[in-house]
Image (tube, coloured by chain):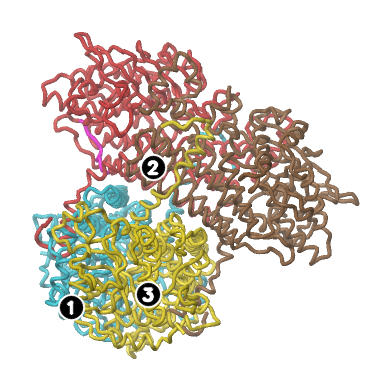
Chain colours: A yellow, B brown, C red, D cyan
Amino acid sequence: MALKPPEAYQQRAEAMRPRVFMNGRRVERITQHPVTRTVVEANRASYEWALDADGEGGRLFTRPSHLTGERCNLYNTLNRSTEDLLQRAGAGLYAAEHLGTCIYRCVGCDAVNALAATTFEMDRDLGTAYYGRLMEFLRLVQEGDHTVAGAMTEPRGRRDQKPEQWTDPDLSLHIVGKDDRGIVVNGAKINISGAYATDWTIVLPSGARRPGEEAYAVSFAVPNGEKGMTYICQYTPYSAERESAESVWELGNPRFGQRETSMVIFDNVFVPWERVFLCGETAYAGKVVTRFAQVHRMVCGGSCKVGFGKVMIGAARLIQEYKGLAKAPHVNDQMTEMVTLLETVRACSKVAAIEGKEAVPGSGVYMPDDLLGNVAKLNIGDAFWRLMALAGDIGGGLIVTMPSLKDLKNPETRAYVEKYLRFGSEAPAEDILKITKLLQNWTAGLHGVGTWHGAGPVQAQKIMVQRLADYEEMKRLAREMAGISVERP
Amino acid sequence: MALKPPEAYQQRAEAMRPRVFMNGRRVERITQHPVTRTVVEANRASYEWALDADGEGGRLFTRPSHLTGERCNLYNTLNRSTEDLLQRAGAGLYAAEHLGTCIYRCVGCDAVNALAATTFEMDRDLGTAYYGRLMEFLRLVQEGDHTVAGAMTEPRGRRDQKPEQWTDPDLSLHIVGKDDRGIVVNGAKINISGAYATDWTIVLPSGARRPGEEAYAVSFAVPNGEKGMTYICQYTPYSAERESAESVWELGNPRFGQRETSMVIFDNVFVPWERVFLCGETAYAGKVVTRFAQVHRMVCGGSCKVGFGKVMIGAARLIQEYKGLAKAPHVNDQMTEMVTLLETVRACSKVAAIEGKEAVPGSGVYMPDDLLGNVAKLNIGDAFWRLMALAGDIGGGLIVTMPSLKDLKNPETRAYVEKYLRFGSEAPAEDILKITKLLQNWTAGLHGVGTWHGAGPVQAQKIMVQRLADYEEMKRLAREMAGISVERP
Amino acid sequence: MALKPPEAYQQRAEAMRPRVFMNGRRVERITQHPVTRTVVEANRASYEWALDADGEGGRLFTRPSHLTGERCNLYNTLNRSTEDLLQRAGAGLYAAEHLGTCIYRCVGCDAVNALAATTFEMDRDLGTAYYGRLMEFLRLVQEGDHTVAGAMTEPRGRRDQKPEQWTDPDLSLHIVGKDDRGIVVNGAKINISGAYATDWTIVLPSGARRPGEEAYAVSFAVPNGEKGMTYICQYTPYSAERESAESVWELGNPRFGQRETSMVIFDNVFVPWERVFLCGETAYAGKVVTRFAQVHRMVCGGSCKVGFGKVMIGAARLIQEYKGLAKAPHVNDQMTEMVTLLETVRACSKVAAIEGKEAVPGSGVYMPDDLLGNVAKLNIGDAFWRLMALAGDIGGGLIVTMPSLKDLKNPETRAYVEKYLRFGSEAPAEDILKITKLLQNWTAGLHGVGTWHGAGPVQAQKIMVQRLADYEEMKRLAREMAGISVERP
Amino acid sequence: MALKPPEAYQQRAEAMRPRVFMNGRRVERITQHPVTRTVVEANRASYEWALDADGEGGRLFTRPSHLTGERCNLYNTLNRSTEDLLQRAGAGLYAAEHLGTCIYRCVGCDAVNALAATTFEMDRDLGTAYYGRLMEFLRLVQEGDHTVAGAMTEPRGRRDQKPEQWTDPDLSLHIVGKDDRGIVVNGAKINISGAYATDWTIVLPSGARRPGEEAYAVSFAVPNGEKGMTYICQYTPYSAERESAESVWELGNPRFGQRETSMVIFDNVFVPWERVFLCGETAYAGKVVTRFAQVHRMVCGGSCKVGFGKVMIGAARLIQEYKGLAKAPHVNDQMTEMVTLLETVRACSKVAAIEGKEAVPGSGVYMPDDLLGNVAKLNIGDAFWRLMALAGDIGGGLIVTMPSLKDLKNPETRAYVEKYLRFGSEAPAEDILKITKLLQNWTAGLHGVGTWHGAGPVQAQKIMVQRLADYEEMKRLAREMAGISVERP
């Protein structure tokens, strides 16, 4: 069977030896370092859910392979109908509700889908053989139930210059060598979620390419820790706190922590042809990127942030109740606003799925409606900041000023904390501090900026909306109502 | 066939002699008064669309009667599936795009649906016979292809008093007499759209009723201009402008104008039992109201306002192009925001339909998801003001300062207007003034306040969201993530 | 004395015979036409206030002439200190509170100030003699206590073309002839407030001019209805309503109505040299415009809109109280938001005055802080829409659906209106309808779009803020805090 | 002279031995612990600035004592005119610009001012002798140039219960003993900024008190680390990061870090009468609190947040320039919005000072205008979240995903970081990482929630605005304009 137990992934992760650095030091074992291991644990959860054959997990996280008919983990499959897109969105929601961070197989999944549609189109148009290669790769990861990360964003040079004006060509990843065995690439990808702990990483181009930029029109898969690859991890206050914690239960998202990314350096990395999915076809680079965004914005812009939001609302509601404010009109007004924001985004994401279409006729790959996906992402960008603000208001100043949960263990301080940090409720101070710490994680940390930039910054979505809006129909309606019969410039 | 030609309705409207007053004067003929006739024309359009058997009109505005199987006008039928709800929403959108104002059969349709579910429930619970009566009434209006208005809102007394504290019991419509032929009612309904020009008006209670308030728990149908009924029309600057215009083509929404409402007075009006659908069953009054809101907010809160918004965006886009600003980033940013707002509301309304459910098991009547309907309405409330502001910014000061279109006909001014009000474009000044006048209608008139209050004010929706949100599930997710195993107060 | 009685102005207005058109017809007597006479009445009020020697009116609307020392109407004087600027703002507030529309001497006043600073600068730099001429003109209007309008905005051609590309050079007003007696100009000004009822109109250029555009760098004063001038009035639904009203007390702003503008055509108008204040000096055209905006945005962007807002809040509060909602938390939350918005704008405008500076050293003319003035205008733009929305929510659906006040006089409807439109309060229906009508004027009419565009559209202010912000200081602070010693690109 | 060198304070701080706990451990030496020492450094800066006799520091941070005439540190003086209030606001701005966090003498200063006005009033009304005591205390801290913290907020019990219903009376600090030497108090204060490192802490009541709550109407001063006092520090991810950093220059606000607070426990603490300033006079407890908020909201709600905002804008601008986006319209639009928000808040705060008045006639203590102070705080609450969002968008995903600055020192990673994290600019990666780290501090940390709650939560300000708004004047204006002569309910 193509569904493997979590232990199988755990064993592979234990054996991985990528070249990882964090905070000036080498991370020798990703399964043991307190920060990098959260990535392993989040991925592991996706195996557990998939095995819940009769439950919500099994329903959301598995589906039959279109290659073999075998039941596979959703993240290694293609979306082949609007129902599949709804399932994809539902899985994102469930993962978010339970992890409170990324499931690190998400980008890879969306990358495979974007490549599936585009390689099908390329083979049809150009007579290339990429689609078959990609399917072979997909069959491989399905059979092994492997984890696949995705990598797109790049350092880039000055935004007011074209790539050829940049002094360092490596600022965008590109092909520097090619022979009959494969290609050699140089460059870096930044903001890459969890790649050091996945079996594979799929690399996509970072944008549309023009003739003359063939070396930059490249896509491929690499195994974890391939020769020439270096991972330099993000390091935030939250990393430091996790590194120095005695117990994860002192932390704001105890088990799964923050979305962990790294910069991934490709220093003359060799990729054999069987794992190359785009190589110089500039006209298709932009299509891969757009299709990736199309499916990824539905998830990131909608479903997974709704899951996070539900946790925030739940925590705020608990604080409201602990404080005896369940009937306070001004707090309920804030709760109502939060629910309204979340349902709004959920609706946009759902309609994006429902109005999805086959990306390339005959490809069998379905993509969500692009306009709605971008609209969902635009909405959640602002909404998430507002959710943070509202939950932060309800949660109270203690979100910032709370002591450590360790002070509840220290015999010199325990009684004071227990006495004074309960708002007079019957819940123990430990519960209140844990929920407040959870809110600290959500409202006083990385999530606002993270939501802005995950799946592309605001301006990227605005450009798409402008491009996709059907102004001609709207002009026609206006002219008709005003009684202007002839179309004039 | 149950679909009648527009002329049939027009003839009935010509024959109607309701007691209508506007601006201090009696309106003798509603088909001839420049303001009231817009209601007739809007209703007439719904007959035209329905007869477009092979086109979008026929698809959206007709469906088989569940009573007779005959194809009927949508507005006289029940929503019996989520597909029906989508059709209902789609009809609202189409009507809005083409009328730029209310289709006056909308409230009546939603009232019949709310009553159908609730009378079914009452008969099941109480052994009454209301459902059958209602179906007889429905069969009648289907066969005649009649127009049906709906009436709910009431003057009411001070909001900090209970109805029994009000000095005047008539501030809420109530039963003042009853015999074996029927009931007699007294009171008034306010903000009633188009009732003076429809064949029937369905009256609903205006809110939940408690034991002791039996006389206020009443619902029934009355024919146009029944004895004892008086209609006092709204009168706005837009009414005055229409009254004094030489040609409708000088106006901002030439053919269909503004949503026209009146206060409807019931001065000892008799209603025979066969048209009484609720009479003293206080426990069900609130259910009728809630179900009415449930379906009406999906339409008013979503689909029909999207139609209006599309016209506004189309008009703004035309001005943008006339001015040579098609590539101006700051204007395109505004266009993008408008499109995003509209798509957002459209999505909420659509998901409300898709997630609809049978209101009462066995009733066969489907209602949209209530949470999403209220969310849609909350969103459009703010969004519509923002659309007005953005379109008003793009449209320019001319929206306020434009001369009359008559100045284009006056030989003393024509050349000046033609020369100076074209922004240098090739379009004639007439086009530019007409589109600007259309924007005046949308951005400098009644639509902001109208959108706030149509289908209930903001606070009504907030209360529903607060009531419908599943806080318990969200609290459970928060506790699970924070590692709090036991539920504690 | 330089302060004349209102009757003197009234007599001049009665004698004026400008060529005015409205709604396709000639307006023969501006003092008698129901719409144009509101302009006369508003101007008249400014004479009344000024004569209230010991009261607030006298304190706000008069100050000594710097030319003669005589006490003059504020609108004919220069702002020569920050105290003067505060007085100028205070006068705008008072006028707005009491008129509910423009005081039509406002633009002219700000135009004279902008010209005073700039002609002083030109004479100093270029050896011209404009300043003296302007002072002679100012002495004349001070002595006669004349009203002076201002005119800047122009039709213009396509925004993506330069003026020289426009097919019609008249789209910007320009000099077409010149001799030793004076100049001849052609073109039009649009959106001009009240000019047909003022003694003089000061014409300013509409933007910065470059070498080669000398003919467009022109400023001058013309008397009311000069040969060659034609005024084509705006015509809105509110104009129509006023034209057809039996009594002004049926209207939303009974005495003073809407801001009344017209397009002013200059068809080969001759201006003698003594009233020409700029003629070809392209480098100074932009300075006049910027300085005009500098003082005008303080007033329009702050003080006068605060006056309007106070009326809106007062009206909303009355409705809240009539309805028995004085203690409803959700309404009080809206009231609080309205007050907060107004106080915010008031503060910005006040600080603009307080931080004002002498525009050109030695000129004695003070201008408000430009950054704050633009900030005030940006804030009020959004705030005014929000005030409209909030007051529109509190005011209720009746704002749109109310009957005419005439229905209170009609014996057939009077009792019904009296009975049903009181919300159960002790106030008579007349009061409630009048306050609701007032709110209709403010929330369902021209004020949102008018506020956007008066004193320049949003984007104009954004450009100024971007230009005026001191980013270098802020970068220095950031570098210092981050520990970056050297400034690097 | 009353201005002491920084070293004097440093020596006292070295000698302090308060009972401080953080993260489960005792902090032995507050000057050596990496987190607590930031408080000492911030306070120290206030001594340095004050000694800059001829510069901005001396001008802002010193003024003559009204007791002795000697020049004192501003934080130990009374505001005795509107000019003083402007100076007070200016000092807050300067401190914020240079510290990027609290100056920990701020709350104490505002507490002394609130007490000065109120004790003066009490003595006048009740014949007590508190004012003299307070002045003696003030003379003492002036002479020693001591630092004074302030403490107001309390744990409190359920918000839907009155204090007497709480099971634990200590949830609000209260008097538990009294004799001829002084009083004994029990309870706790939470969210107290920097108290463990100041010479004194002034304790205020936390709210208005009613008869029967005499024990809770108490105010006094205690020296650092008085017997019975325990300080339990906040512990955030930022604390952990600072604790584990090798060099402060790796951090987001290197020298001064985050606002550091602690819960301060009073376990039967004795206070001699000469330091008791309120003791049972319930009617004056609320006045102290209100007056404290009055001055504190002007500073916290306006001036100091403007200082923070300037640093954020400066940092965002640098990133914009590094990336070559200085002319990108969408980024400049965001910059403009940030500047507009800051200037708005600055204006509100400034007008609060300018419109200040003597709090109690004869007291000589000036308080800012209360309405404006609350308006400023309401504005900055929302504005700060928006600043965070905008700066976070411009700053880019790197704000979350950036590696440690240590990775620039590690020879295995240095070249990669240097090569890839420069955006193609000429600035070294170190600069870019430092500015990005600064933005991480501002946009991805504690500042949103901190700004909400510092100086009181949103709802507290809304209540004050509602209370202070002059609705009667606004109603009068509305009635006048509508033509309603008589005032009716």
Mark 3 crowdedness (10 Å alpha carbons): few <14, some 14-19, many ≥20: some
Residue stretch rendered in magenta on the structure: C365-371
Q: Residues within 10 Å of mark 1 (few under 14, many from 20)?
A: many
Residues marked 2 and 1, same chain? no
Q: Residue at x 21, y 80 (%)?
A: A19
Determine which residue is flagged by label 1: A24
Is residue A416 toward the left or the right of residue B206 in the image?
left
Q: Are marks 3 and 1 in contact (CB under 8 Å)?
A: no
Q: Residues within 10 Å of mark 2 (few under 14, many from 20)?
A: many
Quadrant that contains the N terminus of chain D = bottom left
* Residue placed under numbered mark 2 in the picture: C381
Q: Which residue is mark 3?
A: A136
**Pointer 3 and pointer 2: residues touching (CB < 8 Å)?**
no
Upstream in sequence: badge 3 or badge 1 = 1
Q: Position of residue A364 (x, y in %)?
A: 47, 64
Residue occupying the point 61% across, 26% down = B243
Residue C368 within the magenta-colored segment of the rendering: yes
Residue depth check, mark 3 versus mark 1: number of the one nearer the observer: 3
Image position, residue B71 (x, y; %): 73, 49
> Furthest-right residue in view?
B180
In which chain is the residue bearing label 1? A
Query: Where residue D362 appears, x then y in whole percent?
Result: 31, 53
Q: What kind of element bears circle 3?
A: helix
Look at 38% across and 78% down and name the residue there: A141
- Give the quarter of the figure containing the C terminus of chain D: top right
